[in-house]
Image: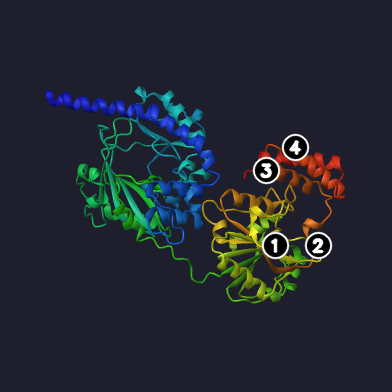
Amino acid sequence: MKKNSSSNARLSGGTIKMALKKNIHLPLLQFKERIAGRHYAKNPRKRAEELFQKAYGRPIDWERPTLFAEKIRWIQFNTDISYWSILADKFKARSYVADKGHGDILIPLLGQWESADDIDFNTLPDAFVIKPNNGCSDLFIITDKKSAPLKKIRRQLARSMSRVYGAYNAETQYALINPCIFAEKIMTEPDFSAGVPDYKFFCVNGEPMMCRVCTDRNYNGPDTKRVTMYDMDWKRHDEWMEPEYAAGAKDIPCPASFEKMKAICRDLSAGMPFVRLDLYDDHGQVRFGEFTFTPAALKRIPSISDTALQYIADRISLSPASAAPTLSVTISTIGKEGIDRVAAMQLPEVEGVEYVVSWQKHEDAPVPQSLQREDIRVVRTPTIGLSHNRNSALSRARGEIILIADDDLSYTSGQLLAVINTFCDNPAVDIASFRYRTPALKRYPERDMPFEDLPKGYVPASIEIAFRRKIITGADALTFNPLLGIGAPYLSAGEEDFFLMQAASRGYRGHYFPIEITTHHGVATGGRKVNDNGVIRANGALIALRRPLLWPVAITAAAMHMSRAGRAPFLRAVREMVKGAIYGMRHLKV
C-alpha cells in the first residue's frame, strides 16, 4: 500500500509538471521565441555564433571547424541547403520518401489542412496523431476522440501555425516551410501505455553511424522518456550519454527490421553530409518519422554526450572541391547584341579564373566562337530583369571569389589577379569594392578604407564589387533583389545598394581599395540623366530604408539636390521618391 502511494505521488507530481509545461512553460517559450525570433531572423549567422559561444565558451572556428555543432553550422552557412527546408517539412518529406521508392514505410495519412479552423475532427477516427509540419513538441496523440479537448487542441495548433519556428535558434530551414497541419494513423500498443520505440539514426554521407532509441515516451502526460544509444552492430554505448541518462537507460532488443532500417537510411540520406533520420518499428513494420538537420537545435543536452557528438563530427568531411576556380567573373547580358559585346570583351585566359555569362532573351542564337572555351560558360536564362540575370550567373559560379561584371567592360590578366591578391592579402574582408576606368567622371577616395568610413553619398557600382563565395551560399545567402534594378516592375535601379545594405546588416565586412580592376566602355548608370520614374522611386526606397524615421526630410533634401543638378523637377522627384519609399518599406526588408 505504501509502495502504491509513493508511486501515485510520483505520477501525480509528474502530471502536474507536464501540465505546467504544456500550459504555461511552452506558451511562454513560444511567445519569447516569436518576439526575439523576429530580431534573430535578420542575422541568423550572428545568432548561431551567439548560441555556440554560450554553449561552448568560445567562438565558432569557421576556418577549421571540429565540433559537431561547428560543422553543421559550417554546412548551413557555406553550402546549398535548399533541400533542408523540403525535407524538414514533415508533410513534404512524405513525397520525398515515396519518390525514393519507400512509400510502404509512410504512416497512413488521415487528412491535411492549411489552417487549424479547417480541421474537421468528425472525419477522423477515435484515435489518431495530429501535428503541424514544422516545429517540435507540438504534436497531439489522441487515444479517445470523445474525451479529447478538441477546442483546446485546435487553439494550440493555430498558435503553432502563427509562429515562425526556428529563428530563435538559427534553424533557418524552418523559415521557408509553408505551415500546415496533418493527421496520421496512430502507432501504439493496444493499451496506449508506452507507444512504439523511436529509432533516431545519425547518418553521415548516406551511412548510418549510431542509433538513439527513445522509449517510454508520453506526450500527453509525465515526461518518462528513456534513451539508449547503440552502434550499427547493436552494441550499447553508455558513454554516448551523460551519466544521469545512462543510469536510467534500459536494454532494447535489436528490432527484427534493423537491417532494413539501415538500408532505408542509406537510401534516404544519400548525398547528405549529415542528417538524423527517425524511424519506428510498428509491430515489425518500419515506419518513417522525420528528417532533422539540427538535432536539439545544436544545443548540448544530457541525453547525448559530447563524446557521441564528436564521434559523428569526426566522420563529417567538409573538404571543398579541389577543382573549383579561385575567381568567378559573372557577366550579365541580354539579346544577340549583348552576347556579341561579351565576345568583343576578349576575356583573358588566366589560371584560376572562370567566366560565367548569363544570357537573357537569347532567342536560341548560337554562342560566338570566341566564347566557346573551357573557362567560359554561357548560361541561357528565361528570366527578365537585371537582378534575375545577375542571380542566374551567381547560382552557377564556382569560384571562392565572385566578381560582378557587365557586357561592356574589358579586363587584363593583371587586373583580375589584383582582385584575387586583394582577398588573399586581406582575409578579414568579405566584400571589396575597387575602381574602374571610364570616360565619365567619377570621384574615388584616394586611400583604402572600410565601407563605414566612405564619404557620404558614395556607393560602389556593381561592376566594382567582388565578394567571397560564402555570402551567396548557405542559410543566409544574399542575392540581388528582383524588385530592384533594370527590368524590375517598379524600382528600376538600386540593386547593388540594397545588396550591400543587406550584407552590412548581416555583419559582413566591406572595404574599399583604390585599385583599378576594369575599363568601362559605355555610359555608367550613375552618370545617366534621370528621366525614368522607376529610378527616382528606387532612390526614395533606399532613402527610406537607410533612414526609416527621417526619410521625409531626407527625400525633400534629395529632391532639391536632384532639381538643382537638372536630373528631375523638384515636385516630380518628391512625388516619385515618396511612392518609392512607401513601396520599399512594404516590400523590402534589410
Camera-side residue of 259 and 104: 259
Q: Are marks 2 and 3 in contact (CB under 8 Å)?
A: no
Disc 2 crowd, CA 10 A, few/some/many (<14, 14-19, 20+): few
User: Where does residue 378 sit, x and y in percent of width and height?
Assistant: 65, 67
Amino acid type shown at disc 2: Leu
The disc, 4 or 3, on the residue closer to the chain's N-terminal end is: 3
Q: Nearer the viewer, mark 2 or mark 3?
A: 2
Instruction: Give the quarter of the figure containing the C terminus.
Output: top right
Q: Nearer the viewer, mark 1 or mark 2?
A: 2
Q: Which residue is mark 1?
A: 463
Disc 4 crowd, CA 10 A, few/some/many (<14, 14-19, 20+): some
The disc, 1 or 2, on the residue closer to the chain's N-terminal end is: 2
Tell me the tag on residue 545. Answer: 3
Q: Are marks 4 and 2 in contact (CB under 8 Å)?
A: no
Q: Which residue is mark 4?
A: 552
The disc, 3 or 1, on the residue closer to the chain's N-terminal end is: 1
User: Where does residue 518 sit, x and y in percent of width and height?
Assistant: 71, 69
Disc 3 crowd, CA 10 A, few/some/many (<14, 14-19, 20+): some
Q: Which residue is mark 2?
A: 441
User: Where does residue 561 sit, x and y in percent of width and height?
Assistant: 82, 46
Q: Nearer the viewer, mark 1 or mark 4?
A: 4
> Residue at position x 50%, y 28% from top?
117
> In the picture provided, is 585 more to the left or to the right than 565?
left
Amino acid type shown at disc 3: Leu
Residue 318 in which image quadrant = bottom left
Cα distance between the residues tagged 2 and 3: 28 Å
The disc, 4 or 2, on the residue closer to the chain's N-terminal end is: 2
The disc, 1 or 4, on the residue closer to the chain's N-terminal end is: 1
